[in-house]
């Protein structure tokens, strides 16, 4: 499985991410020619050295002028409606029209639009206005679209199976922008990084911009430490400013260990001692229907010698808040405990096998030296009911079908 790990020890900005991913390419000139053919801006890649580390700095210029460094100020590209009207402004609808006009694949266009919508939502929240009243000044618009388009184009060329992102260093202190002094992280950046592990530290300045935060939020499958992987390429995307540490985004490209997809899952738990079995069953079904990965209960003994039930819900980490809300809504608990668990997973695939009773799906799993196949119970049960035979008879037919296809049966 192709793995991309993005290390954000010095935050992230759109041009820094583009530069880091650019370093992973074999056809670097082809990418520069393609992005410049869009007519958004003039994009150039320059090799630079910071703190003894060699990397790439991406310059994005419009009419020969480079926008304010994206790793220097928040809001360089996005401003609410009350901003200085000496500049031309464009709305989110204008942005979508511009994106639609680009000679890019639908996949890239959709990703650019999704990232820009994240930024618009964050700016609207920060300024307390509807998204329809958020405007982007004309020069900054094309500069930001070029940054975002570049990253989306590179992600399409690389096509990672999984993107893992480190905790994000956001910087500290205050930064000056059109609205005055703002705390770091800027309000829009803080909004975008909700649910993402972040930290401050002693470096003064803004290290993660709204554009960088939106790109990380959109493409990141999970956030945490570097997973076990066989690294084949490393890229360094340099920022414009200099700090006491090398100002760069570092990316690692490679294969996950034993082709196995490790990840995280959130475990939500609560103790219940004042609900009926029917009410717990209803809450159980609500969580399942909402898409929980698994829900189960265990009998427990609680304080005051009362028998109770431990309700556990497994869900994706980024959906933990949603499922915790469902638990609080549909049970009598006053609190939900959350644990983020690392997990080991087999690479999964669905196959089918033909039997006298119809097609039966097989769940397959491989990795860690294990190869496992299991017939879907619901398919076996449906076939047994429809043909008025026992489960065991259908299972025997599935075994025969698996053997004829060279599959070792494990049912």
Image: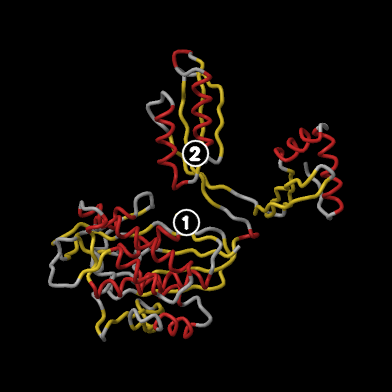
User: 409 or 227, which lies in front?
Assistant: 409
Residue drawn at (74%, 48%) of the image: 373
Indicate the quadrant where residue 114 lies: bottom left
- Sequence order check, earlier mark of 2 and 1: 1
Residue drawn at (20%, 54%) of the image: 127
* Residue receiving disc 2: 290
User: 200 or 340, which lies in front?
Assistant: 340
Residue drawn at (49%, 39%) of the image: 290
User: 330 or 88, which lies in front?
Assistant: 88
Q: Position of residue 357 (x, y in %)?
A: 81, 42
Query: Compared with residue 226, is residue 236 higher up or lower down, i.e. above or below?
Result: below
Indicate the quadrant where residue 89 lies: bottom left
User: 376 or 366, which lies in front?
Assistant: 376
Q: Position of residue 226 (x, y in %)?
A: 49, 59
Coloring applied to the structure: secondary structure
Q: Secondary structure at mark 2?
A: loop
Mark 1, other Cα within 10 Å: few <14 / some 14–19 / many ≥20? few
Query: Compared with residue 232, is residue 128 higher up or lower down, i.e. above or below?
Result: above
Residue drawn at (53%, 21%) of the image: 300
Q: Position of residue 140 (x, y in %)?
A: 26, 72
Task: Give yes or no for contact between labels 2 and 1 (Cβ–Cβ under 8 Å).
Answer: no
Q: Nearer the viewer, mark 2 or mark 1?
A: 2
Q: Secondary structure at mark 1?
A: loop
Q: CA distance from mark 2 to mark 1?
A: 29 Å
* Residue receiving disc 1: 225
């Amino acid at each position: 499985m192709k793995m991309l790990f993005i290390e954000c020890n010095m935050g992230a900005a759109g041009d820094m991410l583009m530069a880091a991913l650019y370093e992973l390419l074999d056809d670097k000139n082809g990418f520069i020619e393609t992005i410049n053919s869009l007519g958004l801006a003039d994009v150039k890649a320059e090799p630079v050295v910071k703190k003894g580390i060699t990397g790439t700095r991406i310059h994005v210029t419009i009419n020969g002028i480079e926008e304010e460094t994206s790793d220097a100020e928040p809001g360089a590209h996005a401003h609410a409606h009350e901003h200085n009207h000496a500049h031309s402004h464009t709305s989110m609808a204008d942005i979508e029209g511009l994106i639609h006009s680009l000679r890019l694949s639908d996949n890239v266009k959709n990703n650019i639009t999704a990232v820009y919508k994240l930024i618009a939502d964050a700016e609207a929240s920060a300024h307390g206005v509807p998204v329809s009243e958020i405007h982007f000044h004309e020069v900054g618009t094309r500069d930001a679209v070029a940054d975002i388009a570049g990253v989306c184009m590179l992600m399409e060329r690389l096509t990672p199976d999984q993107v893992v992102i480190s905790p994000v260093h956001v910087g500290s202190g205050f930064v000056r922008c059109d609205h005055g002094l703002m705390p770091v992280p800027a309000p829009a950046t803080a909004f975008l990084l909700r649910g993402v592990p972040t930290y401050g530290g002693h470096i003064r300045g803004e290290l993660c911009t709204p554009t960088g935060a939106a790109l990380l939020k959109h493409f990141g499958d999970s956030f945490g430490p570097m997973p076990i992987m066989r690294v084949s390429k490393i890229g360094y995307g340099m920022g414009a400013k200099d700090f006491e540490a090398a100002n760069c985004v570092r990316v690692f490209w490679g294969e996950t260990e034993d082709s196995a997809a490790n990840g995280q899952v959130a475990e939500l738990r609560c103790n219940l001692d004042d609900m009926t079995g029917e009410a717990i069953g209803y809450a159980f079904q609500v969580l399942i229907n909402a898409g929980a990965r698994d829900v189960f209960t265990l009998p427990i003994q609680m304080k005051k010698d009362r028998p109770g039930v431990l309700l556990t819900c497994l869900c994706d980490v980024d959906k933990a808040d949603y499922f915790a809300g469902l638990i609080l809504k549909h049970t009598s608990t006053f609190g939900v405990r959350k644990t983020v668990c690392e997990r080991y997973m087999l690479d999964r695939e669905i196959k089918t096998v033909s039997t006298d009773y119809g097609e039966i799906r097989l769940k397959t799993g491989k990795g860690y030296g294990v190869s496992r196949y299991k017939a879907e119970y619901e398919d076996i049960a449906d076939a047994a009911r429809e043909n008025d035979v026992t489960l065991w008879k259908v299972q025997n037919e599935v075994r025969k079908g698996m053997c004829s296809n060279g599959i070792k049966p494990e049912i």
